[in-house]
Amino acid sequence: MDTTSSSTSATSSRDLSAPSPPKPVGPAWVPRVLMRPMIKKLNPIINRRAGRAGFELAAQIRHVGRRSGRAYVTPVTVRRLDSDTVMIGLTYGNQSDWARNVMAAGGCELRMDGRDYHATSPRLVDLADAGPAFRSVYTRFQRTVIRRVLGISQFMQLTVTPAG
C-alpha cells in the first residue's frame, strides 16, 4: 500500500510541476531558404501597413527583447479564434526571436485591424492539436499553403484584451 500511495503522490507532483519546455521547432525549407533572405527588405515594407484597418495580411506584434530589453515591432499573421483569443502561425518556428521574447515576457502588445490589444498567456499549440480552431479560421487553400508550402507546424495562441 505504501508503494501505491508514494507512486500516486509522485504522479501528482509531476502533474503540478511546471510544463516541460516546448521542443524546438525551426522553420521549414521554404521559409528558411526562400523567405529568410528577403526579411530585412520585406519586413519594413509590410510593417508600414501591418495592423492598420482593412489590412488583413499582417498585424504588428510589439515585444521586448528578453536579453537586450529593447522594444521591437514585428509583422505577423494573426487569426481571431473568438472575441478574446488569437492564433499566430509560427512561420519561423518557436525559436524565432519574437516568439521567444513573447514567451519569456508572458505577453506582448498587438495591433490588428487598426486597434491595439494587450496579449497575454502565450501558449504554443502544435498543428495536430489545433484541429477545429485551425479549420475554422483558415480556408482550405490557406490550410494547404500553411502545411505544405510554409511548413508551419506550430501556432502561438494568445488571450487579447483591448488596450486603453
Image (cartoon, grey):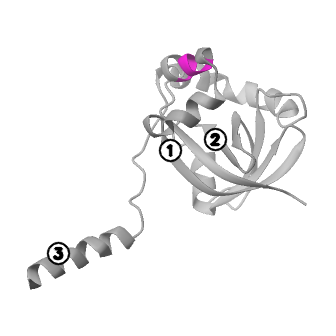
Query: Which region is colored magenta?
Result: 142-146
Q: From the image, tell me which residue sits under label 1.
A: 125
Q: Where the N terminus falls, by quadrant? A: bottom left
Give me the disc on residue 7: 3
- Image location of residue 37, percent across then percent down: 61, 23
Kind of residue at badge 2: Met
- In the image, what residue occupies the spot 17% across and 81% down? 5
Answer left or right for 93 relative to 69: left
Please name the predominant secondary structure of the magenta segment in the image: helix
Residue 140 visible from this viewpoint: yes
Which numbered disc flags the more N-terminal residue, 3 or 1? 3
- Image location of residue 164, percent across then percent down: 91, 61
Residue 91 visible from this viewpoint: no
Residue 11 included in the magenta stretch of the image: no
Number of other residues with Cα within 10 Å of mark 2, as a class: few under 14, some 14 to 19, many 20 or more: many
Based on the displayed image, in which of its 4 quarters is residue 141 positioned? Answer: top right
- Image location of residue 131, percent across then percent down: 49, 34
Q: From the image, tell me which residue sits under label 2.
A: 87
- Closer to viewer: mark 3 or mark 1: 3
Kind of residue at badge 1: Val
- In the image, what residue occupies the spot 87% across and 30% down? 49
Element type at marker 1? strand
Kind of residue at badge 3: Ser
- Residues at marks 1 and 2, CA–CA distance in whole angstroms: 9 Å
